[in-house]
Amino acid sequence: MSTAKEKLQQKIQLIDEFEAVEALDFIEYLEQKRFKEISEALKNAPEIDETLTEEELQALKEADEDVKTGRTLSYEEVFGKDE
């Protein structure tokens, strides 16, 4: 049984360039709609009102000290220069 993506790829092979442009526009619309829905959900999400534990507060203080004293790694050092 084919997945929806496989069926879509098969149908794309059958359409002309004009229809492909329309299909691409629709897919981009769906992407924008999904992004907007996620953005709205995040914007309307309630704030977390949990208090931090002593352990979490200590970890934040240590991280702050690491940054202040330069005990950090750059993006390139962690992921390499090709990323």
Image (cartoon, rainbow, N blue to C red):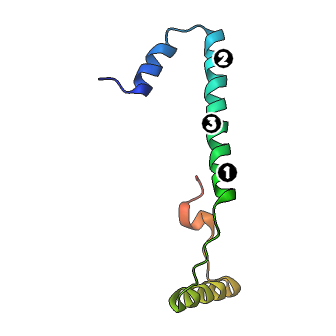
The N terminus is located in which quarter? top left
Dot 3 or dot 2, earlier in sequence: 2
Give the amino acid type for the residue marked by disc 2 in the picture. Val
SS at circle 2 = helix
Mark 3, other Cα within 10 Å: few <14 / some 14–19 / many ≥20: few
Q: Nearer the viewer, mark 3 or mark 1?
A: 1
Dot 3 or dot 1, earlier in sequence: 3
Quickly name the residue at label 2: 21
Q: Residue at x 62, y 36 (%)?
A: 31
Q: Nearer the viewer, mark 1 or mark 2?
A: 1
Q: CA distance from mark 3 to mark 1?
A: 12 Å
Q: Position of residue 25 (x, y in %)?
A: 67, 24
Check the image and report above or below for 47 versus 38. below
- Decide: marks 3, 1 in contact (CB < 8 A)? no
Check the image and report above or below for 32 versus 13. below
Quickly name the residue at label 3: 31
Q: CA distance from mark 3 to mark 2?
A: 15 Å
Dividing the picture into quadrants, the one containing residue 4 is: top left
Q: CA distance from mark 1 to mark 2?
A: 27 Å
Q: Nearer the viewer, mark 3 or mark 2?
A: 3
- Decide: marks 1, 2 in contact (CB < 8 A)? no
Quickly name the residue at label 1: 39
* Front in this rendered view, residue 15 or 65: 15
Q: Residue at x 63, y 85 (%)?
A: 66
Give the amino acid type for the residue marked by disc 1 in the picture. Ser
Q: Is residue 4 left or right of residue 20?
A: left
What's the mark number on residue 12? none
SS at circle 1 = helix
